[in-house]
Amino acid sequence: MNVDQHLKVAQWHIEQARLHATSEHACGCPANDHDQKAIDAVEANLILEEKTCSL
């Protein structure tokens, strides 16, 4: 993905987080492996550029 595509995906996730913060949109969906990797990196303050696609 290019930079613009990454930013669009990030924007989508931010909007989903805002929606999930309201009572009308609380789904409780579990994180997949890719998302959990991102969560772990943020929580550890260890955000590195991915050089290859993990899919």
Image: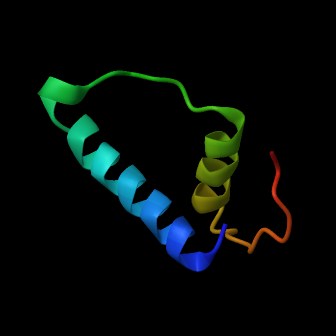
User: Residue 25: where, in percent of width, then height?
Assistant: 21, 28
| Residue drawn at point x = 63 percent, y = 53 percent | 38
User: Residue 22: where, in percent of width, then height?
Assistant: 16, 35
Front-most of residues 6 and 48: 6
| Residue drawn at point x = 67 percent, y = 70 percent | 47
Front-most of residues 15 and 26: 15
- Left or right of residue 5: residue 26: left
Front-most of residues 37 and 6: 6
User: Residue 14: where, in percent of width, then height?
Assistant: 35, 56
52 vs 30: above or below: below
- Left or right of residue 26: residue 39: right
Quarter placement of the C terminus: top right
Quarter placement of the N terminus: bottom right
- Left or right of residue 21: residue 43: right
Residue 27: quadrant of the picture: top left
Front-most of residues 27 and 46: 27
